[in-house]
Image (cartoon, rainbow, N blue to C red):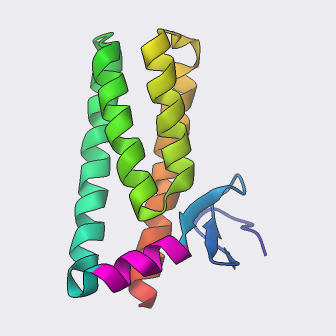
């Protein structure tokens, strides 16, 4: 089953998909994290979401300032956190953004930031749905 309209997610073999049929959220990874963290799991997810918004804004500000070192640093941090929590699509996009910042290839940067923001919205929805169903 796939998403047919924005805001709906489908669960397929332990993965919630985003609109591009890429994994927005790995449920297996998230369930393992929930088991490991116990009652603090929901606080960690909330902290992640707040940090995601801050990092995305820092990336945007660094791009406006043409500060590629900060773009790479913030993207690297976002990549690591996303992969830990099971947001592999966002992690992949952050990794690509980090790479192009290191190389100074700015032609893709606006597109990648747009995709990262869109993936962040999908991830937020998937995390919210997951947490509200638990």
Magenta part of the protein: which range? 27-36
Q: Quadrant of the N terminus?
A: bottom right
Residue 31 within the magenta-colored segment of the rendering: yes
Residue 53 within the magenta-colored segment of the rendering: no
Closer to the camera in the image, 67 or 29: 29
Give x and y (percent) for residue 3.
71, 67
- Badge count: 0
Q: Quadrant of the C terminus?
A: bottom left
Give x and y (percent) for residue 4.
75, 66
Which residue is most to the right? Answer: 1
Residue drawn at x 48%, y 28% is 97
Q: Is residue 121 above or below residue 113?
A: below
Closer to the camera in the image, 61 or 44: 44
Give x and y (percent) for residue 16.
61, 70
Residue drawn at x 49%, y 46% is 91
Residue 56 visible in the snapshot? no
Q: Is residue 67 left or right of residue 98?
A: left
Residue drawn at x 34%, y 24% is 71
Residue 73 visible in the snapshot? yes
Q: Is residue 78 above or below residue 99?
A: below
- Image-quadrant location for residue 102: top left
- Majority secondary structure of magenta residues: helix
């Amino acid at each position: 089953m796939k998403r047919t309209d924005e805001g709906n997610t489908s669960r397929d073999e332990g993965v919630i998909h985003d609109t591009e049929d890429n994994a927005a959220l790995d449920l297996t990874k998230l369930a393992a994290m929930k088991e490991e963290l116990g009652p603090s799991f929901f606080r960690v997810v909330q902290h992640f979401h707040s940090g995601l918004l801050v990092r995305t804004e820092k990336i945007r500000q660094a791009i406006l300032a043409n500060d590629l070192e900060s773009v790479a640093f913030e993207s690297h941090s976002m990549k690591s956190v996303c992969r830990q929590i099971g947001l592999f699509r966002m992690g992949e996009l952050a990794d690509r953004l980090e790479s192009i910042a290191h190389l100074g290839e700015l032609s893709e940067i606006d597109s990648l930031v747009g995709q990262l923001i869109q993936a962040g919205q999908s991830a937020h929805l998937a995390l919210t749905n997951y947490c509200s169903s638990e």
